[in-house]
């Protein structure tokens, strides 16, 4: 962690599709990086800071499928006219199975 970076959790690059849902409407986004406390998404959509919803990240390996799902809210937005917007998401609540899957995703990516 640098002096300018107040993150408590290490982020790792992780490129996968994620679905952010708010009030029953789902938005498919690209995941750029992930940590135990949140995820950075890239999206054409622009979400306001503070917007609450849920997130789902599905990992597929052959016939096996694992899912990270939980409640979250938007904490950061970086707009772009030339490319996708960056949406910082913080996890608010997650079931224990999703937490274990997320932990193992991060551990695997660090090696």
Image (cartoon, rainbow, N blue to C red):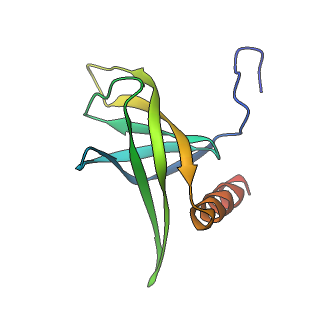
Q: Which quadrant of the figure has residue 87? A: top left
The residue located at (77%, 21%) in the rendering is 2
The residue located at (67%, 63%) in the rendering is 104
* Residue 21 in picture, x, y percent from top left: 31, 47
Question: Front-most of 44 and 27?
Answer: 27
Q: Which of the image's four quarters has the C terminus?
A: bottom right
* Residue 68 in picture, x, y percent from top left: 51, 60
Q: Which quadrant of the figure has residue 95? A: bottom right
44 horizontally vs 77: left or right: left
Farthest residue, direction top: 4
Q: Which of the image's four quarters has the N terminus?
A: top right
Using the image, determine if residue 20 lies above or below residue 82.
Answer: below
Using the image, determine if residue 10 lies above or below residue 16.
Answer: above
* Residue 56 in picture, x, y percent from top left: 42, 56
The residue located at (47%, 42%) in the rendering is 72
The residue located at (62%, 41%) in the rendering is 37
Farthest residue, direction left: 25
Q: Which quadrant of the figure has residue 106? A: bottom right
92 horizontally vs 16: left or right: right
* Residue 30 in picture, x, y percent from top left: 38, 46
State how many labels appear: 0
């Amino acid at each position: 962690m640098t002096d300018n970076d107040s993150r408590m959790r290490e982020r790792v690059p992780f490129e996968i599709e994620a679905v952010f849902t708010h009030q029953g409407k789902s938005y498919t986004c690209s995941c750029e990086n992930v940590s135990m406390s949140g995820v950075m998404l890239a999206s054409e959509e622009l979400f306001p800071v503070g917007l609450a919803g849920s997130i789902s990240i599905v990992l597929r390996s052959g016939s096996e499928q694992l899912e990270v799902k939980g409640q979250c809210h938007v904490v950061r937005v970086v707009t772009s006219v030339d490319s996708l917007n960056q949406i910082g998401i913080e996890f608010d609540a997650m079931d224990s199975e999703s937490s274990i899957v997320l932990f193992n995703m991060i551990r695997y990516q660090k090696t």
